[in-house]
Image: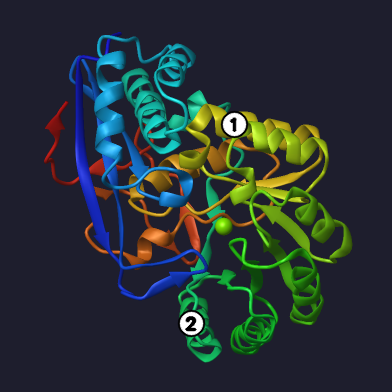
Amino acid sequence: MRIDGIGIMPIEMPLHDKDWAFALATVSSARGYAIRLSSGGVHGYGYAPAIPHMGSTFEGLPIELARFAPLIKEFDPRDIEGLLQKLDRSLHGAPQAKAAIECAAHDLVARAFGTPLWGLLGGKRTERVPVIRILALKPPDEMAAKAEELFREGYQYFKIKVHGDIHEDVARVKAIRERVGEDAHLTIDANQSYSPKEAILAIEQMARYRVDLFEQPVHRFDLKGLAMVTRESPALIEADEAAGTLEEIAVIVKDRLADAVSLKIPKLGGLRNARAAARLCATYGVKYRVGAHVGTRLLNAHGLHLAVSCPEIDYACELGEFARMDGDPFTGLEVENGHVELPKDNGCGVQPIHHSWQVI
Ligand SMILES: [Mg+2]
C-alpha cells in the first residue's frame, strides 16, 4: 500500500454567532485545512484546524502541509509510527498539520481494510457519546438564555466560558444554573485567566451552583499554581492548555498536578499520541475526556472514534461545536438529543460533499 495522491482543501465555516468570544480571542469563523491521502483510488481524510494558541495559523498550515507532502508521498500509510517519525524529524511542533496527516492515514487504512476507524484504535466501548456545548463569553443573562435554548434542544452538558473577573463569572454560573435547572451538568473553562488564589476563591463561590469540572484555571506554564488549585479546590480541576503535548501530560499525571486532562487530536499531533495520553492518564488514575474539536464534522468524527475507543471516559465530550457553524464540506455526523452517534460507514464515517482539492 502506497500513498499515491495528496490534496488539501481550505475550509472556512462561518459561525452563527459572529461575536463568539472566550478568554483568549473573539472569532467569527472556524478555519483550517482538510487533507486527502489517496491510495489505489481509496481516499482518507484529516483536518488541521487553524488555532493560534495550539501553534499554527490559517496562513501557516498550507506551508507546513506542503513541507510534509514529499515526505509521505509513496509512503505506506499502514506504517503510522514511521510516518510520524518522518514528520517529527522534519519539523518540531506543527501538531495540527501532523494530526491531519496522521488522521488521514488512519482513515485511509480503515477505509481500505473495510472497517470503521475504531477497529484500528482498540475497539469501541459505546456507540453514543453525550455532547457538551460551549457557551461563549457574554453577559450572564445572554449566556443563560443560550443555555436554556440548548437545553430545550436536548443538551444536558454545558461548558461556561469565563474570563477571570470573579464577580461576573460567578454571576454567569448562577444565571445559567437558574435557567437550566438542577439536572443539567455545568463545567467551567477559564482559559488560563485566573491567578491560583483567585481561582480557588472563584471555585469556592461557584461550588454552590454545582460545577462538575473547572478547566485550565491558571496560565499554562504555572504548574505550581495548577497544583495548588487542584489541592485546595472542591471541584475537579482539568488541564487543557497546560496539557498541550504528550510530554506535558506525562508530567501532569505523574505529579498529579490536575485531576483531569482534556485530550484533543490537533494539539497532541494525532490519534496515536491521544491514545497514548489516555493510557498515561489511566495508569496514574487521572481522568480524561475528549475536549473541543472545533470545526468540521470530519475532525469531530475522528474525535468520536477516539472517545468510543477509550474505556475510562465517563463524562460528556466536546464533539458537537459544528452545530453552531455553516458551510461544512463534510456530512455524516449530527447531534441528536444531545448525543453524537458513531457513523455506520467505514473509516471515520463522514464523507466530503464537494471537492476542491489542490494537489500538493
Ligand atoms: Mg479549554
> Which residue matches tag 1?
275
Quadrant that contains the N terminus: top left
Q: Earlier in the sequence, mark 2 or mark 1?
A: 2
Q: Is residue 202 above or below residue 302?
A: below
Residue 335 picture location, percent across and down: 42, 60
Secondary structure category for the residue under label 2: loop
Q: CA distance from mark 2 to mark 1?
A: 35 Å
Mark 1: few/some/many CA within 10 Å (<14, 14-19, 20+): many
Disc 1 marks a residue whose amino acid type is: Arg
Name the residue nearer the viewer: 122 or 195.
195
Secondary structure category for the residue under label 1: helix
Q: Give the left or right position of residue 148, taking residue 217 as reference.
A: left
Q: Is residue 310 visible?
A: yes
Disc 2 marks a residue whose amino acid type is: Lys
Q: Is residue 181 above or below residue 200?
A: below
For residue 69, what is the image quadrant? top left
> Which residue matches tag 2?
138
Residue 31 picture location, percent across and down: 29, 53
The residue mark sitting in front, 2 or 1, is 2
Mark 2: few/some/many CA within 10 Å (<14, 14-19, 20+): some
Q: Is residue 273 above or below residue 184?
A: above
Q: Is residue 329 visible?
A: no
